[in-house]
Image (tube, helix red, strand yellow):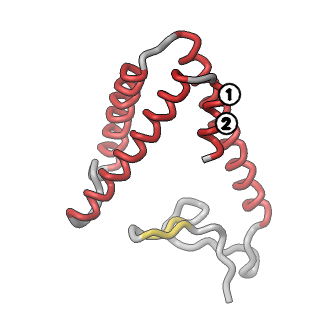
Amino acid sequence: FEWKIMTMTSKYGSIGADGDVENDVVNNNRPSESWGRYRNLIGTTLALVSGGLFTLNNFLINLNDVSVCDLVLVRCLMQMVLYTIICLYRSENVLPGSTIQDKCLIVLQGVAAALTFITALASVTSMAVPDALCIVFSC
């Protein structure tokens, strides 16, 4: 029996903790405990920063009377440009997937994420920010 350090596996392959495609095993087949704590600390920090930025963003939207349509358009354009640059740099397909079904599911996931974002922003402009955030974060 071998211990493996947090390996992410998908149909595209697995990625070890050090970024290699192989599995990480250290110190006589026992996982490094400090690496697990470090990853948990990073994950917790990123979650807190994300929640804080989301909350700050919603307060700024509510205070400045920003149009949700304009905000979503600017965000969409910025994400498309950044994602395309990253894909070109890595020599990857902009729309990965081997079959038409995979590509349709990826597009469907993007549409669902966009609707989630639009409705979250619309809720912030329609009601008090703390109430909207309570509903958004609890669902």
* Of 93 and 104, the residue lying toward us: 104
Looking at this view, is 98 or 138 the one in front? 138
Question: Image point 67% across, 31% down: which residue?
Answer: 52
Residue at the far top in the pictured view? 64
Q: Position of residue 49 (x, y in %)?
A: 67, 35
Does the residue at mark 1 contact the one at mark 2 (Cβ under 8 Å)?
Answer: yes
Residue 18 figure quarter = bottom right
Q: Residue 99, percent across and down?
A: 22, 66
Q: Nearer the viewer, residue 76 or 36?
A: 76
- Label 2 environment density (alpha carbons within 10 Å; few <14, some 14–19, many ≥20): few
Q: Residue at x 33, y 28 (%)?
A: 77
Looking at this view, name the residue that lies furthest to the left: 100
Residue at disc 1, secondary structure = helix
Q: How many marks?
A: 2
Q: Is residue 38 left or right of residue 18?
A: right
Residue 8 vertical position relative to residue 43 in the rendered view, above or below = below
Helix, strand or loop at label 2? It is helix
Residue at the disc numbered 1: 130
- Residue 111 at what x, y percent from top left? 34, 45
Q: Quadrant of residue 1?
A: bottom right
Q: Residue at x 40, y 71 (%)?
A: 11
Residue furthest to the front in view is 127
Amino acid on which disc 2 is placed: Cys
Tell me: residue 53, above or below residue 36: above
Whole-percent x and y of residue 86? 37, 41
Residue type of the residue flagged with mark 1: Pro
Disc 2 marks which residue? 134
